[in-house]
Image (cartoon, rainbow, N blue to C red):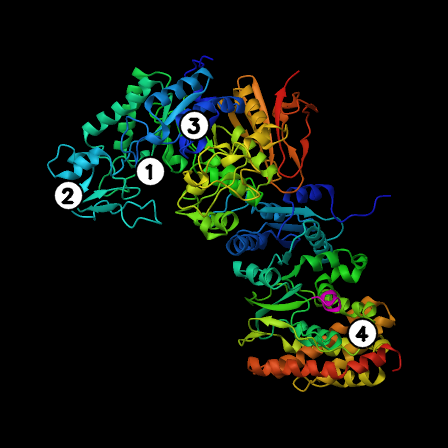
Amino acid sequence: MPLPQDALWYKDAVVYQVHVRAFYDSNADGRGDFRGLAQKLDYLQDLGINTIWLMPFFPSPLRDDGYDIADYHSVHPSYGVLEDFKAFLDGAHQRGIRVIIEMVLNHTSDQHPWFQESRSSHDNPKRDWYVWSDTDTRYRGTRIIFLDTELSNWAWDPVSKQYYWHRFFSHQPDLNYDNPAVRETMWGVMKFWLDMGVDGFRLDAVPYLVEREGTNCENLPETHVIIQDFRRRLDEEYPGRMLLAEANQWPADLRPYFGGGNEFHMAFHFPLMPRMFMGLKLEDRKPITEILQQTPAIPENCQWCLFLRNHDELTLEMVTDIERDYMYDEYAKDRSMRLNLGIRRRLAPLLDNDRRRIELMNGMLMSLPGTPIVYYGDEIGMGDNVNLGDRNGVRTPMQWDGGWNGGFSTADPESLYSPLMLNPVYGYQAVNVQSQKRFDHSLLSWMKRLIRIRKSLAVFGRGSIEFLYPANHRVLAYVRQYGKDAILVVNNLSSSAQAVELDLRHYKGNILIEMFGRNIFPRIGDLPYLLTLGPYQFYWFRLRKI
Amino acid sequence: MPEETILNDDFLRELMNVGEVDLLVGVPTYNDARTVGQVVQAIRTGLLKYFPRQRAAIINADGGSKDNTQELVRAASISDMHHADNLYALRTLHCISTRYTGTPSSGTALHTIMAASDLLRANACAVISPDSTSITPEWIQTLLQPVVNDVNDWVTPVYRRHKFEGLLIRNLLYPMNRAVYSSRVREPYPTDFAFSGRFASHVAGLDTWSEEAARVGAEMYLTIAAITGKFRIVQTYLGPKSRGEGAPADLVAAMRRSVGTLFWSLDSTFNIWSADLDPEPVVTIGPEHELDPEPLRFNRKRLHDMFARGVGELEPVLRSILSHSTLCQVQQVASSPEGELGYTDELWAHTVYEFAAAYHKSVISRDHIVQALAPLYRGRTYTFLAENRDNSPEALESNVEALCLAFERSKPYLLEMWNGRK
């Protein structure tokens, strides 16, 4: 299946985020690999997603799940070899699935040869590839991100007797982007993968590329210059490829990363995600509409990326103190569920495994303006294991069936990279792909339908949004419009049945066609349009003037 | 024939939009634009500050204001489009207003608020008078917390009052209510109070709302309903209440709303109060009473004249209400020159009880009975002011206590009068 040639393909994408290690083990070594992932491409095609986002798969000491890269030009031996990656990439493209890979620009592993050279002596040619200092007092205005583990953004290097700068773990020294050689080298890394055929990069931790005294060392103008340079080269040499920003910032601070349409194509909307959970728990649309009101317009060729859960904790950096306390109390009563400024849980456990709430949240994910990302395993309602350290509890093996190792691997269970989920609620015998494939009403089957409908109209990915603000605050309603297509989305955030009157006079004369059952609802007239919704129910209506 | 409803369709639609709430604050109004904006802002701040996570609503029951009272209440809403200026709101806060049918009355307003509270299944509900301009956001916490945290059902206020404010309460309502119902509620006729959802459900469903006395004196009626219904009652200290607030200009109207309702309640609760009731202590959060020693100015000569003239002019009426002995004593007091007038505790208790019994027996029009008590109350007030002119708050309180004991001692006398043996 040839890939569509639309340059704005990422607006219509439904992205599936997956870690190679966690998906399928083809060689019985207890870790997933590219050959395994390639074998499961049919599953992903059947699910309906059209883009895969791969988490880091490069050689790495794996002290931060691969975000500590030791070699940018290869594949971690556990996952196979470059040829395996190429085969996987070709297989995906043949199925009409694009592939985005992770690119960690900001830092490397301290095991990377560049850092080893850099620390080896003060006059090494790569000394200036990292940020060194005689004191740990520079850039004092910079916050510490991993509050639970790091005391400072500086770490002492006993080898070269200087401090080095790191915004994340101390084993992840930041590259020095003031050095043109670093910028050139990193573009070379990107070219390496673009030449192989990858469709885009998720650029990790972009706000932190440059440091300046007297600032908070985030979102600096110099960082934007670097991004613009990468984008210009990308457009010139690889048209149709895409850059996605990982920048956990407020929408107004994120806006500059789109520039005038000449920086990132897409950026994650971090503040929206916790507010979707908050709105659901409060049974009040206010947190959601409020953050979307604060979200600035972005250039026509740009797009927000929306997600419910990912490989990290549910970050609460972009909420107020009152909101954070509320989220902790409601979603992470058990303190072991908390990590840094967030909650390390998967979607289904966060929502008490309530099918209605899982459907509602996915319904909003797929219908709010942006490109949705589904985190692997959430399509079947996988659980988490907070007893595993760091964020490993949400990175357990994919559960394919109820057999040996949940169908993930034929290795001995003891040799798996992570324990399987075993409990009676979320364990692989209860929650797995094979059993859900058998039933039309399983979560997996429902997700397939949802994705199919989402992909059936460009309005979901490209349309404008107009909120309706009915007097019933438990109901979140909006109209998406793109060209002649218009859809009405009505979400009941409440655990009880609700009646709502919608002011649809602007659409008078249209009939409503419910998109899941294709049933016709009454024509819109002059009076407020009355709808009743069951607990956590949502409707997608197509507006048709017939 | 559809059953009569207190909630009109528009209001019902608004309630549907509000949905189930944890907390509700009701504000009964009638042409209160001058003060209601400030009051509602304080309520809103109190809700956001002290109950940020709870689902809350402010409901205004209006008697048909011609000023923009209702708009001022609605303007305090917090929604997607309207934000609070200085405080962050986690949730939507609906501030809705309804115009109830009929003439303006606190009873209809409170019935509307209670029906709404019942319908929205509020766990706790407070009612704030629209002219309580001394309200602070802390009032909301102080009133609602005893219901939310300690599962009380009826919360009455204790204010820091000026020395000679609340005279009707101190000289009649508190002592008689305490003696008759054995419950030491300091403000049985409150304008700011709170109650539980359980209590709202109980009261909203009572038939007595259709009766005039319940409608005009709803606050008094609710206190009595809480006491006689064995609901958990607590008093809570709110702090100062602005001078003159809530004090009706018309004494007779105030007595109709309070004393009239207290007398009226005795009929339906006879089986309760006539029994040998154990005194029910009422827990007070904060000081039980607090007085500002600076006295208010009163025209005592005018009080004396009105008392003496009233006793003289109303003699035929008083003769049908009071016993011969009591009437003679009252006339004797009324004939005393100013400065020597002394309406004793015992005589006052007997007077009030004889009026209550006469009300029960409807010896004349019940409304006339309450009206006829007004001049005698002025005589009693004169005595109270004279006695306590130079008293410290403690001494004044001790005199109030003595009066209460006189009412308690005289309760058998009320029963005798009631049963017609005297």
Q: Nearer the viewer, mark 1 or mark 2?
A: 1
Foreground residue, A208 or A221?
A208
Chain to which the residue tagged by mark 4 belongs? B
Residue A218 visible in the picture: yes
Labels 1 and 2 touching (C-beta < 8 A): no
B178 sits to left or right of A247: right
Chain to which the residue tagged by mark 2 belongs? A
Q: Find residue A540 and report its horizontal and vertical position in percent.
A: 61, 27
Q: Are marks 3 and 1 on the same chain?
A: yes
The disc placed on residue A115 is: none
Q: State the separation of the CA atoms marked 4 and 2.
A: 98 Å
Q: Which residues are magenta?
A: B224-231
Q: In the picture shown, does residue A410 fall above or below B127?
A: above
- Amino acid type indicated by mark 3: Ser
Q: In the picture shown, does residue A88 fall above or below B315?
A: above
Labels 1 and 4 touching (C-beta < 8 A): no
Chain to which the residue tagged by mark 1 belongs? A
Q: Residues within 10 Å of mark 3 (few under 14, many from 20)?
A: many
Q: Are marks 4 and 2 on the same chain?
A: no
Q: Secondary structure at mark 3?
A: loop
- Amino acid type indicated by mark 4: Ala
Q: Residues within 10 Å of mark 4 (few under 14, many from 20)?
A: many
A153 sits to left or right of A479: left
Q: Which residue is mark 2?
A: A160
- Amino acid type indicated by mark 1: Leu
Q: Which residue is mark 3?
A: A26
Q: Are marks 3 and 2 on the same chain?
A: yes
